[in-house]
Image: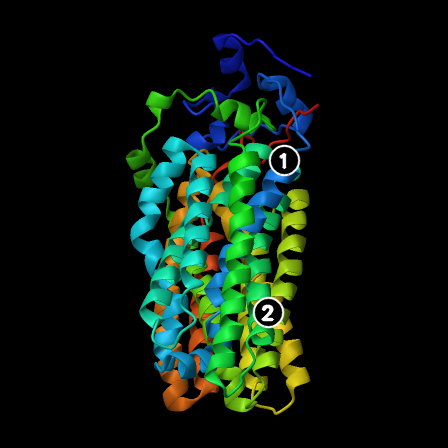
Amino acid sequence: MSSQDEFSQDDWSQTGFEKTRFGDYKHPLLLGDSSNTLETSALDRSQLFPLMETRLYRRRWVMLFIFCSYSMSNSFMWLQYSIISNIFVRFYSVESVTIDWLSMTYCLTYIPLILPVTWLLDNRGMRDVVVVGSAFNCIGAWIKTGTAYPDMFAMTFFGQLVCSAAAVYCLGIPSRLASLWFGQQEVSTACSIGVLGNQMGIAIGFLIPPILVPNVDDMNELAYHIRIMFYISAGVASVIFILVIIVFQERPEIPPSQAQAQARNIPPDEYSYTASIMRLLRNKPFMLLVLSYGLNVGCFYAVSTLLNRMIIEHYPGEEVNAGRIGLTIVVAGMVGSLICGIWLDKTKTYKQTTLVVYLLSLIGMLVYAFTLNLGHLWVVFITAGGLGFFMTGYLPLGFEFAVELTYPESEGTSSGLLNCSAQIFGIIFTISQGKIIDKWGTLAGNIFLSIFLLIGTVITGKILTFPRGDLNCVYTPCLTRAVPSFTV
């Protein structure tokens, strides 16, 4: 079905709307006219805006599944060392902080690569980025298959470094894929599912390594188990790479929403990557979100990386249960992510939902910190699950809120800046908390993270104080991702 309404320039003047160069329509309230606000319903907007043909394709779910599989494989390899860090410390005869760096390399690699990758995403498209990323993921996994020997730590670090480069190519994709393939009423849910792929990989990374690599004394037997884990990772990564090459597409022939239809009308010569970055850096609400998102997700990275050390300190010999606790954190977070995505699609209350979830993440962190040393593993499972539900559930909220604050800027660029902040804080928090745990114990380390979550909560609340004119489409009747689409 295709709809098209013709309006003259005089018609637009009479309605009180002004068309921007992005294909947007601004209400005069944004220009300072507060005396006569124009209340427009969804039906009114459908009559005012020139409508274009839109369509939802069933294969959008295939694209989402393939990306989720790639992201899952890559995030599994992020944690396959740290969740059994005590075993790898003994196997490679290195210090625990050295094994921590096998996880932190994911954060470190992201910082110099994020701008080139977002440029590639904007200029070459999503398919090229996913193909390159899945290729790195596959190559890194196969490099590690030959490193199950005590003297091969340098090579296993190199393989992990290649896998970490693949992570840069997938972290900004969920919001872009959701916008390009999904309709307005499902875009936040699709973004949440895209993030779930990453979380599923983390969950498997918590669960499987302690099962595949038991803490045995015989080094040859230990090497055999490690080799099996590496070969399984490489086999899965290879299958996913082949699927990406054969099946994954850039975007549908017909856009899924009016926002995407309008975005396709922007002439390429009117878009500047550098100018887009500068506009984002001058967007005050977005920059506050970048800071608060980095604090929250950086805490999550630190907890995930150091979970084995925290559990083993209070419950010696419980490597398998440490993995199960990590699984509980992530599975609860996956439920939280999905619920938050569905809630956003129905309500579009981005600011309020983000603030509430952030505050509950802080409360969850405090409860987890003060119950970890009680001596009851079942209590840790419950409190860790509560922490994961809100802290991991916050991930897609940050992506979607950023896109809404910055539309029509590239989703990959806004997501990239969020992730860059998260990686920086992830490195800082992991190193700092590790040193605090070594010197003062896990309680002090978790209180350290709680302080920064409190700061992040205050910063998130600050976004609520910005007037509507300083924000974007969610709070104005302009044509963006938040306006209902017309589909067939």
Disc 1 residue type (three-letter): Arg
**Residue 20: where, in percent of width, then height?**
43, 23
Q: Mark 1 points at which residue?
A: 60
Q: Look at the numbered disc 2 and give the secondary structure of its residue.
A: helix
Query: Which quadrant of the view contains residue 335?
Result: bottom right
Disc 2 residue type (three-letter): Ile
Q: Mark 2 points at which residue?
A: 208
Q: Work out how far the residue at label 1 is from the one at label 2, CA to CA, in angstroms.
A: 30 Å
Query: Which quadrant of the view contains residue 267?
Result: top left
Residue at 61% of width from left, 28% of height from top?
Answer: 256
In this view of the protein, which residue sits in the foreground, 406 or 320? Answer: 320
Residue at 50% of width from left, 39% of height from top?
Answer: 176
Q: Which of marks 1 and 2 is in front?
A: 2
Q: Which colour scheme is used?
A: rainbow
Say whether residue 190 is left or right of residue 151.
Answer: right
Residue at 65% of width from left, 15% of height from top?
Answer: 2
User: Quick one: label 2, few (<14), some, or many (20+) residues within 10 Å?
Assistant: some
In this view of the protein, which residue sits in the foreground, 412 or 277? Answer: 412
**Vertical relation: 64 (above or below) 125:** below
User: Quick one: label 1, few (<14), some, or many (20+) residues within 10 Å?
Assistant: many
Asked whether residue 261 is in view, the answer is yes
Q: Look at the numbered disc 1 and give the secondary structure of its residue.
A: helix
Q: Quadrant of the N terminus?
A: top right
Disc count in the image? Answer: 2
